[in-house]
Every structure is written in structure tokens, then in C-alpha cells.
């Protein structure tokens, strides 16, 4: 069983904001697979489907992003998910827009959602796909990550949809080391 989690904030006011890259790409992936993320459990929206006789869960925590770990921990415990079978998709201020980074371990990089996940799972060893949103140091970080993405930047985000969906597919179907070799770029 694999758990693919997109981090974001719930609600219309947060749609198409930089902090919602995880929600954006998990929705794109669900669309690609013809899956609707509409079941609710443990304060999260999720969908299940099978791929190569393995159950896949797509999850969007409905807690605010800084409390995502609370929802994720409940899914990990309830579905008995091995953390090597979990991928977290989130935004990354330290990576340029249009780029991404795959990691198997490491620090939260200041991302409060990842900090919460690490605190509640009691580990930094889980797979994450960090989506670059760049960083405008002239704007307060909170205001920047919660601001709407302009049309030019949204085009870059949309242009990456296919590659991000391919990474998710490959995470489901291949060894992570091979995945990192195939896709890792910054």
C-alpha cells in the first residue's frame, strides 16, 4: 500500500496559492488517473485506487498545512502504512519556480507542515517531493506563500504537471533510488 499526500490549506481562499502546490499536483494526478478525491476520514479528503494489485491512497489533509502531520499520522496508523511507502508533495521556498527536489530524508527546510509531520511521525526519514515556488524576499514569507500565483507563474506550474504526475507514477512503481537518479534536479 502506498500513501501519496499533497499538502495545502483547505478553502477557496487558498486555491492557486504557492503554499497549495501539494493540493494542486495531487488533484492533477487524480485527474490523470480518473479518480475523484471525495472520501473523508480523519479530517482528510482521500481517494483509493489499485495499481498493479497494490492499493494507492491519495490524501489531502483538511487541517491547515501547519497541522498536516496530525491527519497524516492517523492515516499511517489506521492503514498501517510503512513510511518507505509514503510520498509527501509540498511547496519549497528554497527552490526556483519550475524546479523540484526529491528527498528521502532531511530537514523540514523551515516548512511548518513538514515540521509537524516530522514531530508526529517522530522521524525525518520519509520521501518528499518539494515543488519550487521561488522566494520573493521583499515580501513577508507568510504573505508570499499565501498569495495567489500570477498567470505567468501558473503557466510554469501547469507546464510541470506531466513530469510531476510521472514522478508520482514512478514512485508507485519503482525503487526510490532509481527514481532519484531519473528525476532529481534543482
Image (tube, grey):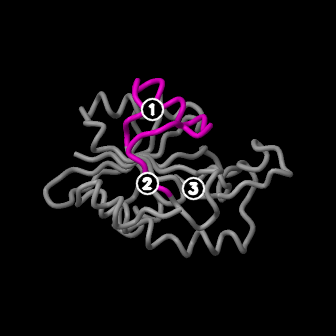
Real-space Cα separation, disc 3 to disc 1, in angstroms:
18 Å
Q: Position of residue 169 (x, y in %)?
A: 31, 63
Q: Callout 2: 10 Å neighbours few (<14), some, many (20+)?
A: many
Provide the secondary structure element on which disc 1 rests.
helix
Q: Is residue 108 magenta?
A: yes
Q: Residue at x 48, y 24 (%)?
A: 119
Q: Is residue 66 above or below residue 146?
A: above
Task: Specify whether 174 is left or right of 5.
Answer: left
As drawn, the residue found furthest toward the left would be 53
Residue at mark 1 = 71
Q: Is residue 27 magenta?
A: no
Q: Residue at x 72, y 74 (%)?
A: 152
Which structural element holds mark 3? helix
Please determine whether, in this image, residue 68 is positioned above or below residue 181: above
Front: mark 3 or 2: 2
Residue at horizontal 54 percent and vertical 37 percent from the top: 108
Q: Camera-side residue: 140 or 18?
A: 140
Residue 109 is situated, as x and y percent measured from the top left of the image, at 58, 40
Label 3 crowd (10 A; few <14 / some 14-19 / many >=20): many
What segment is highlighted magenta in the picture? 101-126
Tag shown at residue 172: none
Q: Nearer the viewer, residue 54 or 126?
A: 126
Q: Which residue is mark 3?
A: 21
Is disc 1 surrounded by few (<14), some (14 to 19) or many (20+) residues within 10 Å?
many
First in residue order: circle 3 vs circle 2: 3
Are discs 3 and 2 less than 8 Å apart at CB? Answer: no
Q: Residue tagged by mark 2?
A: 102
Amino acid at each position: 500500500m502506498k500513501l501519496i499526500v499533497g499538502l495545502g490549506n483547505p478553502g477557496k481562499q487558498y486555491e492557486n496559492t504557492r503554499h497549495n502546490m501539494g493540493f494542486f499536483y495531487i488533484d492533477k494526478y487524480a485527474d490523470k488517473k480518473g479518480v475523484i478525491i471525495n472520501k473523508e476520514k480523519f479530517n482528510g479528503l482521500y481517494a483509493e485506487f489499485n495499481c498493479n494489485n497494490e492499493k494507492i491512497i491519495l490524501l489531502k489533509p483538511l487541517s491547515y498545512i501547519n497541522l498536516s502531520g496530525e491527519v497524516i499520522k492517523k492515516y499511517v496508523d489506521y492503514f498501517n502504512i510503512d513510511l518507505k511507502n509514503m510520498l509527501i508533495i509540498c511547496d519549497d521556498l528554497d527552490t526556483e519556480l519550475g524546479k523540484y527536489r526529491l528527498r528521502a530524508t532531511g530537514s523540514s527546510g523551515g516548512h511548518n507542515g513538514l515540521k509537524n509531520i516530522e514531530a508526529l511521525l517522530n522521524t525525518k526519514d520519509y520521501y518528499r517531493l518539494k515543488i519550487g515556488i521561488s522566494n520573493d524576499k521583499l515580501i513577508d514569507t507568510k504573505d508570499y506563500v499565501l498569495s495567489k500565483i500570477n498567470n505567468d507563474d501558473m503557466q510554469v506550474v501547469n507546464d510541470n504537471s506531466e513530469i510531476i504526475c510521472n514522478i508520482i507514477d514512478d514512485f508507485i512503481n519503482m525503487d526510490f533510488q532509481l527514481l532519484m537518479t531519473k528525476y532529481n534536479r534543482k
